[in-house]
Amino acid sequence: MAGVGCAAVGGTGFPSHGPIRAGCCSLAPWRSLHNSAAPRLSVPPCISLYPTARYLFAMAAPQKVCVVGSGNWGSAIAKIVGANAAQNPKFDSTVKMWVFEETVDGRKLTEIINTDHVNVKYLPGRKLPENVLAVPDLVEASRDADILIFVIPHQFIGRVCETIKGKIKSGVLGISLIKGVDEGPDGLKLISDVIQEKLGITMSVLMGANIANEVADEKFCETTIGCKNKNHGALLKELMQTNNFRVTVVEEHDVVEICGALKNIVAVGAGFCDGLGFGDNTKAAVIRLGLMEMIAFARIFCTAGPVSSATFLESCGVADLITTCYGGRNRKVAEAFVKTGKSIEELEKEMLNGQKLQGPATAAEVHLILKHKNLIDKFPLFNAVYQICYQGHPVAEFISCLQNHPEHM
């Protein structure tokens, strides 16, 4: 090739006539060489003078994936991602999962996962793919990743970001499955925004009607990815989607994330209803009023773009709200709160096997945001959950807090 006066590209044998780009590379240099009177080039038979898109895609290094978190939901999503990565050449076959090291029955949890391929503490009875590698060191797990999947309680995201800041690759694509919000000096802060600001990476979100055990059992369900970049959204969908875990991608990432956080507050209210012995009519009213408060909150605080009612009809909206109000941990603990008289903190320790409850914490953060904006009276359900969980307001008065809801005026 040197006799042609061209530099070879990356050892491929292709002459360097400017950058080769998939789908838009010029064939003119190749045609001129082919049609000229110059001696024919000696090219190995395995190399075509007309590079195809297939060859160019093959040149791209497989994307390395790290799941940051290994609780119930983190392990369920690692099960999906591990299986997909093992079959798709776009992704590196090894999926690392950061595991906060614990001892279970005298063995390290990472050892159990890597040997027995089961997270016996947080997702017992479900096999993880053998290519999911449990790593106890957060920096080691994340340093080579091209895609970071954040699945931890939102209370810990600041500490996690500080640990890996400056120690991850540039150009990393992040996706948050974390359901919660942060209350900053200027009001509402989405968890994806916190991650993006601290790490300087592009973020998307995934939220939906996804109870982790059912997802891990491969029962059919849907989920929603909120992503502004269509190419990123398509890649993440390819990483996440299975026959029984169907993914829809929408652009309103902030609305998708707000839905995932606020529905946990409503679920606490639904649990109060169950504990107080109210029927399905009352619970349906709580769900509807909760949805209306979710929409109103989003229209005030989601300012990145228009807030479409259609997004609330995706899995991240009404579907997630319904399943959480009937089957989630927030509902279950809130019901026990009514029946036992124990504190939320006590019940969290007794009932959740080390997992964290998001509803009450999110209610507290939302309360501060609404108070800052002088909007508490516009959100009586959110406020009632906060007052009952943190200010000793009698839970028996929960429904009376809703009887003069703005929706009824």
Image: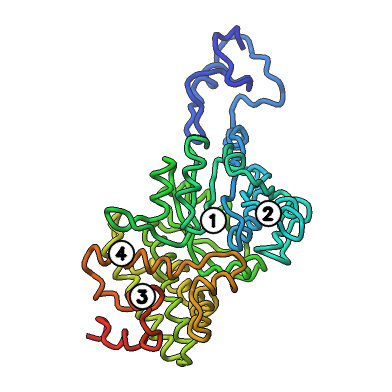
Q: Looking at numbered disc 2 in the image, what kind of residue is underneath it?
A: Ala
Please tell me whether mark 3 sits on a helix, a strand or a loop. Answer: loop
Closer-to-camera residue (319/98): 98
Q: Which residue is mark 1?
A: 151
Foreground: disc 3 or disc 2: 3
- Which circle marks residue 391 in the picture? 3
Locate residue 312 relative to residue 40 in the image: left or right.
left
Pinpoint residue 210: horizontal percent, then vertical percent. Answer: 55, 68
N-terminal-most mark, 3 or 2: 2
Along the line of sight, which residue is nearer the eye, 97 or 64?
97
Q: CA distance from mark 1 to mark 4?
A: 25 Å
- Callout 2 secondary element: helix
Pointers 3 and 2 in contact (C-beta within 8 Å): no
Residue, disc 2: 83
Q: Upstream in the sequence, badge 2 or badge 1?
A: 2
Q: Earlier in the sequence, mark 4 or mark 2?
A: 2
Question: Which disc, if any, is residue 106?
Answer: none
Residue type at the position of mark 1: Val
Q: Nearer the viewer, mark 3 or mark 1?
A: 3
- Residue at x 23%, y 70% (from the top left corner): 375
- Identify the residue under disc 4: 368
Give the position of the N terminus as an image quadrant. top right
Camera-near label (4 vs 3) is 3
The Cα atoms of the two marked residues, 4 and 3, are separated by: 14 Å
Q: Report helix, strand or loop for mark 1.
A: loop
Label whose residue precedes the other's in the sequence (3 or 1): 1
Q: Residue at x 62, y 52 (%)?
A: 100
User: Label 2 to label 1, Cα distance in Å?
Assistant: 18 Å
Q: What is the CA distance from the residue labelled 3 to the residue labelled 2?
A: 46 Å
Badge 1 crowding class, 10 Å Cα cut-off, few under 14, some 14 to 19, many 20 or more, is many
